Amino acid sequence: MIYTNSEKQSCRFICVIFLLIHIIIFPFLLPVVEGLENEGLDKLPIQINSIPLKDRDNVKKITEEKTSFLNWRDEEIKTGAGIFNYILDRPEFTPTILTELDIANYQIEGEGKILHFDDGEGMTGELKMLYKRGNERMYQGTYLYTAGIGVPLRLSGEWVSVLKYNEKGEELGIDIDLYLKSGDSGLGRVTKEIPIIIESIMFERINFYIDSLRELSELIQSEPDDVYDRLKESREISKKELKELETNFKKWKGTKRK
């Protein structure tokens, strides 16, 4: 392949920027690096026959040609499966609840089966559920991470994630696998050579998502009346959504609400 002078200059500029980033932020990433190295490489099973036919080839490509693989094991959440399923199965509505309760502030908006997310911290993209089987979920999506002032740095690619939970008495143990495949253009080529950059970003963002879902799940479990009373005052929640919440709160609590 023959590059023009402008393309060569762009590549050199990108490499210099990433070299500086690598030198400046690498010491701060060491705890993350150690955390990732301590993770086991065991992988959750992928139910390939449950994936829609049109998505199977892309899933195989992402999982087999991955740039990075991250996993989380035994993330404990003190809640019931009913509450956790409710939160997982309403990806567009859950961010509204999180915002209203001052837990987190990110957005997920729907367009058919494809959802668009923006975490307000530079990470945007698309996601869709590939399958749901009992206590297992599988998702596929794209990501675009933008950082920097003046000349923004953009990292893009695709991902596949598998989530599984197990009930452990009064807690849930959550296992998550995340396959990352960096894009072939722009900075994606650089992250393939220095994967710790995108790994550290994703590790931090997924931890943020897990923590927000943990806090919400545990809050509903421990203080259902307080949560409902706060949400029913919201102008962002429709009467239909509030009625559905009330029905589920009654079920989780096992008592009648006045």
Image: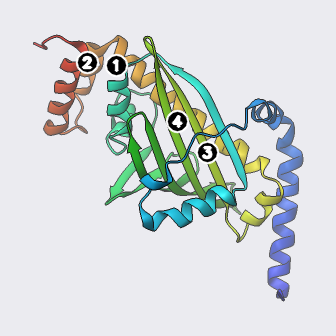
Residue 44 drawn above or below residue 172: below
Disc 3 marks which residue? 178
Res 180 visible: yes
Q: Quadrant of residue 14?
A: bottom right
Q: Whole-percent x and y of residue 192?
A: 78, 59
Disc 1 marks which residue? 220
Q: Nearer the viewer, mark 2 or mark 1?
A: 2
Q: Whole-percent x and y of residue 103?
A: 44, 28
Disc 2 marks which residue? 252
Distance between mark 2 and mark 4 Cα atoms: 23 Å
Question: Mark 3: few, some, or many residues within 10 Å (few <14, many ≥20)?
Answer: many
Q: Quadrant of residue 150?
A: bottom right
Q: Residue at x 45, y 55 (%)?
A: 49
* Circles 2 and 1: CB atoms closer than 8 Å: yes
Point out which mark residue 124 bears.
none
Question: Mark 2: few, some, or many residues within 10 Å (few <14, many ≥20)?
Answer: some
Label 1 or label 3, whichever comes before in sequence order: 3
Distance between mark 3 and mark 2 Cα atoms: 31 Å
Which amino acid lies under the numbered mark 2 shown in the image of this protein?
Trp
If the image is split into quadrants, where does the N terminus sit?
Answer: bottom right
Which amino acid lies under the numbered mark 4 shown in the image of this protein?
Tyr
